[in-house]
Amino acid sequence: MNSNLKLIWGLPDLMKGSLRAWLLCVLLLVAGGQATGQYVNLPLGHWAYGFLERMQTKGVLRDANLMNRPLSRSDVAAMVARISEDELSAVDLERLEWLRAEFALELERHSPVPNERRHAVTLEFPDAHFVLNPAGGFKTHTAGGIELADAERSVTTTTVGLYSYGYLYKQFGYSLFFTNSREQGNPLGLPFSANDASYVRRLSPERGLASQRRRQGGDDPQFFFDTAEAYLTFQHRGFGVEYGSEVNRWGPGYRGTLTLSDKSPPVPTLKVRLDLHNRLEFIFLTSSLRTNGSVDDPVYEKIYGGARPRRPSKYFTGHILTLNLPGATFSLSESVVYGLRLEPIYLVPVLPIWSSQTDLGDRDNVQVTFSADVHAMKDVRIYGQLHVDEIEFSSLFGSDNRNWIGYQIGILLTDALSRVPDLNLRGEYTKIDPRAYRQRFPINDLESHGYPLGFWTGPNADNLYLSAEYFLSRALSLTAWFERTRKGELRPVVDQYYGKEAVIFLDPDLNSERRRIYSIGGRYEPFRDFFVELSVQRISNETRSVGESSESEKTNLFFGVRYNLY
């Protein structure tokens, strides 16, 4: 057997059966005709997403599906090629030219080729193109930033890494991004679960860590941690297959999304995507999640006669159907979180998950999410999501239903309704029910690595975000924003299933934390992918318990430089 095929057949059980089936499909597609293009995803933190959203809201970019991310570089290039230059300001035109150079290779199929940006290493062959760039950064919070809202101490992080991607034979692509970082001054350990006090201490929208190695304690703790994302892709016409460790994001939210967001670290994922003429998109993915608990290994005990704890297996499987219309995009997703075994029935991409879960005895956690993004009016974008956890269609409107919801609504105004060029105004509100994201059996909670898969606050919380962003030039932007976050203590999970009393949002008889942040800052990009960032934040943190409360305030200065870090 070919060594590459041996590698695929030796993958974890989660992927074995699925990969064999999809490999057969890939071979048939390759034999059936030449592929029309390969794809490599654009990192979730790239500023191109915000620019495309702005162009669509202004009405100069039509038929763009920005609902589910990451987008491929080829799809982004196609959108860049369709942007009309009419009514664009000088700053927007300069930013557009910057993107045309970034996606020069992918733009070959859409328009005359502009000058391609430079990379540290570029390898070109008749049937292949590979790019490699170093990555690195430094950032410091003089008063601990958002994570240490109730403490004042300097926290610095230094990062080095590598970013590489490439194409092969017009059908295959790959991406590799990894970093090694040292964080100094942060005394917080990793959370055990998104539903306990260990996570409340790390209540921020920044990407969570998968691991953390403590090298020094005392008054000056140091942590070392690694991050990595890597995947392989295949594409034939509108059909694509992707396997690797990555983060996916479903929904139009800016500060976060409700079912799949970018809060949790990357997880091993098999993803299949079908795009029908940019009108209808279907995505199926299944991921292996990480739990922080342990169970005894019966196989080890049977062989060696002793107990050995291991992490129980846990999986996320979902599919999402997106309809892209002129002036609006709508999507409906269905997903399940389950553990301790692998269910082949969940790996059938087109089979309704809710009915499959019912056939298996109704012991897993099924969520349904509806998303809408309306931009039919020039310079106005209105979007929202409705997430229903533990959905039961038979009692959908009954008083005894267990349809525990989270919702989000937001608005984006570009150019202050055509009165102030190069200005974005945004407002967004998100609320998560105390019973959402958590289940009777913790293995079914919507989380991985101790972080929510959905919105970063977790359950029994809401978040209000307001911002104004002004672009003085292509390279320089200023942003002022305000955020209010409220997070309440959770009752025992049995109360939401069997308790006689109603579960109340931010119950005054339980502890809660309330945080307000006022921030103003700027970002400067003197040359491509090198950013200098500076901001001042006023952070107010209030902790409430029954009969008493305490409040602390501090001013935090943030400074950071980064290159090829998104």
Image (cartoon, rainbow, N blue to C red):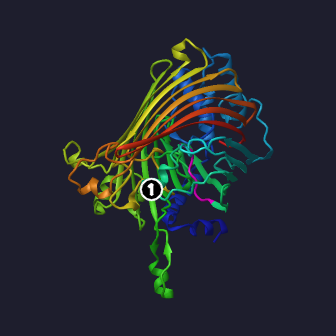
Q: Which residue is mark 1?
A: 316
Whether residue 152 is situated above or below residue 471 in the rendered picture: below
Picture quadrant of residue 405: top left
Q: Is 513 left, or right, of 532 in this rendering? A: left
Name the image quarter holding the C terminus: top right
Q: Is 504 left, or right, of 223 in this rendering? A: left
How crowded pointer 1 is (Cα within 10 Å; few <14, some 14-19, many 20+) is rated as: many
Residue 203 inside the magenta-drawn segment: no
Asked if one can make out residue 178 in the rendered structure from this viewpoint, the answer is no
What element does badge 1 sit on? strand
Q: Is 512 left, or right, of 72 in this rendering? A: left
Q: Which residues are magenta?
A: 205-212
Asked if one can make out residue 314 in the rendered structure from this viewpoint, the answer is yes
Q: Nearer the viewer, residue 526 or 36?
A: 526
Q: Give coordinates of residue 276: x percent, y percent.
A: 48, 39
Name the image quarter holding the N terminus: bottom right
Q: Residue at x 62, y 59 (%)?
A: 212
Name the dominant secondary structure of the magenta segment. Answer: loop
